[in-house]
Image (cartoon, helix red, strand yellow):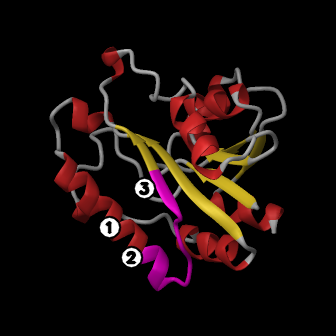
Amino acid sequence: MKLIILDRDGVINRDSDMFIKSPDEWQPIPGSLEAIMRLYQADYRVVVATNQSGVGRGLFDMHTLNAIHDKMTKAVAYAGGRIDAIFFCPHAADAHCHCRKPKTGMLEAIAARYNVDLHGVPAVGDSLRDLTSAAKMGAQPMLVLTGKGARTQVAGGLPEGTRTYPDLAAAVAALV
């Protein structure tokens, strides 16, 4: 089974320092929906792993998060792709949970759900926490320069072996 793990904000959709708090604020990055379609056509299982501390901060509730994810999955389906699962951490940063990236809880849950070792599995993100979580699990960290990606690249400290791409479409083109 081919598996890929994608962060959400800044990878699939435009990011905001004020959080994506409603379905109306969720806007795909140009080319990202088509990239997910290409992954689907290449028999990848596409899994999203996303920190959503806005829930823990009280900026939006679970109903709203589900509505945002519903909009995303429908947009991907309309483009001819599929998201197989969405894993998220709803906790605020000060909750000290095990699931919030850069910790590995979400990726451990993905590995358990699909009964796979994540060694070498592509994991695409725009922040150091995405890449660090992936590297800790032996996944292949892939940085996109959309969202916070350009700032992440400039800040440095990327895990060894991180591959860098302009956006999700370019990362997918390198894979398939």
Dot 2: within a 10 Å radius of its alpha carbon, few (fewer than 14), some, or many (20 or more) residues? some
Residue at point 15%, 34% (across, down) = 58
Is label 2 in contact with label 3 (beta carbons under 8 Å)?
no
Query: Under tag 2, what secondary structure?
Result: helix
Label 3: element kind: loop
Q: Which comes sooner in the sequence, label 3 or label 1?
A: 3
Alpha-carbon distance for marks 2 and 3? 17 Å
Circle 1/circle 2 CB separation < 8 Å: yes
Residue that carries the numbered disc 3 in the rendered image? 14
Residue under the image location 56 percent in, 56 percent down: 47
The front one of 171 and 74 is 74
Q: Is residue 95 above or below residue 131?
A: above
Tally of numbered discs = 3
Amino acid residing under circle 3: Arg
Q: How far across and how far down the image is residue 150, in percent?
A: 60, 40
The residues colored magenta run 75-86
Residue assigned mark 1: 70
In the displayed structure, would residue 163 be above or below residue 23?
Answer: above
Mark 1, secondary structure of its residue = helix
For the point 65% across and 74% down, the residue is 40
Give the quarter of the image for residue 160. Answer: top right
Residue 142 locus on image (x, y percent)? 72, 44
Relative to residue 45, is residue 118 depicted above or below? above
**Which numbered disc, 3 or 1, marks the residue closer to the eye?**
1
Three-letter residue code for mark 1: Asp
